[in-house]
Image: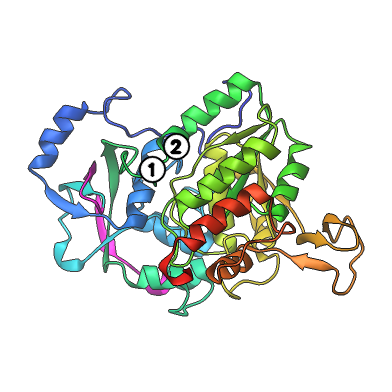
Amino acid sequence: MQGLIAPHGGTLVNTLAGSAPGLPQPDALRREAAGLARVTLSAKQSCDLELITIGGYSPLTGFMGRADFESVCRRARLADGRTWSIPILLAVPRDSAPGVGARVALHAPNGTLQAVMTVNEVFPHDKALEIPSVFRTEDPAHPGVAQVQAEGEVCLAGPVQSLTVCVDPGGPEAFVSQRLTPAQTRAEFDRRGWKTVVAFQTRNPIHRAHEYVCKCAQEICDGLLIHPLVGETKKGDIPADVRMEAIGVLAAKYFNPQTTMVSVLPAAMRYAGPKEAVHHAIMRKNYGCTHFIVGRDHAGVGTYYGTYDAQKIFDTIDAADLAIAPLKFEHTGYSKSYGGMVSGKSYPKIEGDLINLSGTAVRDMLARGERPPVEFTHPEVADVLIRWARSLPETR
């Protein structure tokens, strides 16, 4: 795969048992796990473990220790100096924390054995440091803040040896056929001859503004990876299976299959705005992407982050270390006078002309049982969304 962008840190991590020299065989690891203390992960921690396992979080080989945690919070870098913006922690209740040197079995919320971990460190979960540095707010109404506040008081750190990359293979949320690992996306990019690949991150169905920026980005890159996040999201977000169905019908009819791929990212949302934009870019670099679309309010929620803050943060990041190039797009929308999608760069701003398009707007519309208009999305996508919305008890 010569010519593809290097993973973050230079090596694509793989902790799956039996898949590489030095890793135990799966049956032996399962037998060991049966006799170990059990740690039940949260949904976010389970997503994080999957990304550690498959290399989406390269160079991490396990949950962060104290030095990395504090460095990430204070400098947006790992302790060794490499760019990293979000702590990846295994926080547990104080009374259930094992001692240093222990081996523990990590289980997903549904009981699936995911991995065995060697505990190299046990350290206090400094929420007073993490919360303001990651979220730029301490407001408990912020979903990411509330999530961290509810986590355990101590953190376990150490490398993992993993047994599964998909927590619930039988569930609709798993999207097994589209759950490509970084090694698999890289192999497919190489097979297609793509040297430059732009990734599009979304936790919403793709509306016309999203489609507009994706197609603009396609003009300058060999390929587009539509890479929706299917891990844990906040209450009120459209479910992942509905989003994926909507994305599927859109991609099938309105995107060129020769230059477009759809896969899923098994990550949990933090809603950390600028810090999460960098986090999302690093993951897509590990998946083999050279460019990353950053919108006006990437990974934002409410009014916690300023307009374009998620773009401005990239001006403060070491571009050579990050390596993946952010593509910064202005706010786009449907212009009534133009009759199509425009941005402030491509068409004059006219008072009252632009129909604002956002995931929040369509969620509110669907909650009222209203069909999204053609200015928001294509009819095929609207069919998927309104069918789901009208199936809900509160919209009947």
Residue nearest the viewer, comparing 224 with 66: 224
Give the left or right position of residue 135, taking residue 210 as reference. Answer: left
- For residue 264, say whether it is visible: yes
The magenta region covers 109-129
User: In the image, residue 139 lies at what x, y percent?
Assistant: 47, 80
Q: What kind of residue is marked 2?
A: Arg
Q: Residue 179's mark?
A: 2
Mark 2 in CB contact with mark 1 (< 8 angstroms): yes
Picture coordinates of residue 177, whole percent (x, y): 44, 32
Residue 238 to residue 248: above or below: below
Tell me the quarter of the picture where residue 199 sits. Answer: top right
Q: Residue at position x 15%, y 55% from top? A: 99
Question: Of marks 2 and 1, which one's residue comes earlier in the chain?
Answer: 1
Label 1: state its secondary structure: loop
The local secondary structure at tag 2 comes to loop
On screen, residue 41 above or below 183: below
In the image, what residue type sits under mark 1?
A: Ala
Q: Quadrant of the N terminus?
A: top right
**Disc 1 packing (10 Å; few <14; some 14–19; many ≥20):** some
Residue annotated with mark 1: 174
